[in-house]
Amino acid sequence: MKNYTSKLTSILNIKYPIILAPMYLVTNEKMVVEACEFGATGAIPAMNWSDTELMRKGIQQIKLNTSKPFGINNITHASNPAFEKQLQVCIDEKVGFIITSLGNPEMTIKLCKPLGIKVFCDVVDARHAKRLEQAGADALIAVNNLAGGHAGQLDQKTLIAALKQEVSIPIISAGGVATADLLADVLNLGVDGVSIGTLFIATHECTVSEEYKNAVINHGASDIVMTDRLSGTPCAVINTPYVQSIGTKQNRFEKFLNRNKRLKRLIKQYAYARGMKMLKKAAFSATYQTVWSAGPSIEYIKEVKHVNEILTELTKDIEFSI
């Protein structure tokens, strides 16, 4: 059994440096509680709740069932008009950490750092890594090309190496971890933790449809494609017949609108809202218009399990020192 030292376990005072990743409409309160009680942690997208009062109640529900730290994923891009209200709820409820995605996280860092709320920033390359470190980010989540949802373009090793050259704050790898061996491999690259999402879709605690769970069981890595038809940003999904029929690239008109400086923000908001509506329709019911978000890690999913079963399997040969 190999022992690792992790800055993430120290930052959050947890046993295992594993984040059950925030997946839109997939990660729920029960899944986060299970991860926290195991000794890891979890995060939920703020967008999973239809309004901020439901978000507040959801956070409070988690607190009733675990005293361990957990996080919220905030879309800081202009495509999310509710960002500031969602951030305020996080501040009011004093969540353990916030994961920022798809936008400038500096407001989040500025408001949360004095309160002791940790801020982890999604990055897909090293361009802004030093700036984020200087702004006060507590860690970077390195989203590689094996991640589900909004994946990066760089492979795991290349991205981690590039970030380690730029910053000294903890790096959390997101994408491609599905077994104990793969977890050990990425820890050996010098990261301080991992964010794992796809592996937890087919769990008893997850409330997506049986069709969605069966899809991640019955499909493999070769069935994952990248589409920019959902939000304008490349997103990893299962290549269903519907995805094939609508294509994975924006049409000429969509591309034209996205290049228009005056309309770009409004179009981004519209595209994001439309894409999230498509994902919501597919997540909880059987429909021809099926768009299921997932990463290549579906290759390793063979059956529905409990969250703590998966975490036990991932950490069986590894110990972490706080």
Image (cartoon, rainbow, N blue to C red):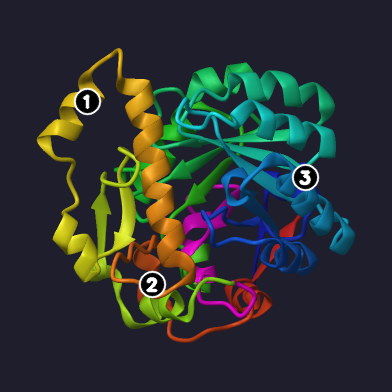
In this view, the residue farthest toward the left is 252
Tell me where residue 122 appears, x and y as whole percent: 50, 37
On residue 56, the disc is: 3
Q: Position of residue 86 (x, y in %)?
A: 67, 35
Q: Earlier in the sequence, mark 1 or mark 3?
A: 3
Horizontal and vertical percent position of residue 75: 53, 35
The mark lying in front, picked from 2 and 1, is: 1
C-alpha separation, residue under disc 2 versus residue under disc 3 = 32 Å
The answer for how far apart the CA atoms under marks 1 and 3 are is: 35 Å
Any part of residue 148 in sight: no
Q: Secondary structure at mark 2?
A: helix
Q: Residue 268's image quarter?
A: top left
Q: Which residue is mark 2?
A: 298
Tell me which label, 2 or 1, sits earlier in the chain.
1
Q: Earlier in the sequence, mark 2 or mark 3?
A: 3
The part of the chain drawn in magenta is 184-206
Given residues 271 and 226, the one toward you in this image is 271
Residue type, numbered disc 1: Leu
- Seen at 37% across and 35% down, the residue is 270
CB atoms of marks 2 and 1 within 8 Å:
no
The dot on residue 257 is: 1
- Residue occupying the far bottom of the picture: 303
Q: Quadrant of the N terminus?
A: bottom right
Res. 69 mark: none
Which amino acid lies under the numbered mark 3 shown in the image of this protein? Arg
Question: Is 72 inside the magenta-drawn segment?
Answer: no
